[in-house]
Image (spheres, grey):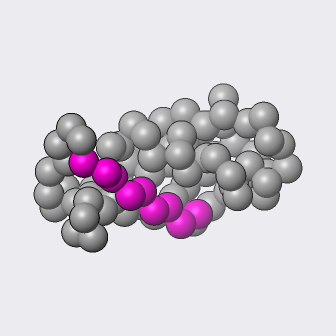
Amino acid sequence: MIRSYPQESGNGKSREILADPELLFGFSGINNVKFRGSVEPGCELLMIAKAKKLSSRIAAFETQGFVDGTLVFEGDVTGLVL
């Protein structure tokens, strides 16, 4: 879950804000992470990310993950522009 957040968060709106649709984001760090449930193969994980900071080199997001409407993950994820 953690590894997918910077990549998914970096898609869409944040690339528009940073004015380059070709940007790729890589994992840089995590803070304040809490796992509140498990995600098993076959489960549909809904990932939500809210941008906290967007710059030309770093993007930071508040993230949450839900399975069947239940919060299973939350934390702050930072990605670097590759």
- 66 sits left or right of 50 in the view: left
Q: Quadrant of the N terminus?
A: top left
Q: Which residues are magenta?
A: 43-51
Residue at image position (14%, 57%) is 37
Q: Does residue 74 appear anywhere in the picture?
A: no
Q: Is 51 in front, or is 41?
A: 41
- 48 sits left or right of 36 in the view: right
Residue at image position (53%, 66%) is 50
Q: Quadrant of residue 14?
A: bottom right
Residue 20 part of the magenta-drawn span = no
Residue 45 part of the magenta-drawn span = yes
Residue at image position (24%, 41%) is 42
In this view, the residue farthest toward the front is 42
- Residue 23 percent coordinates (x, y): 73, 36
In this view, the residue farthest toward the right is 19
Q: Is residue 4 above or below residue 43?
A: above
Q: Quadrant of the C terminus?
A: top right
- 20 sits left or right of 79 in the view: right
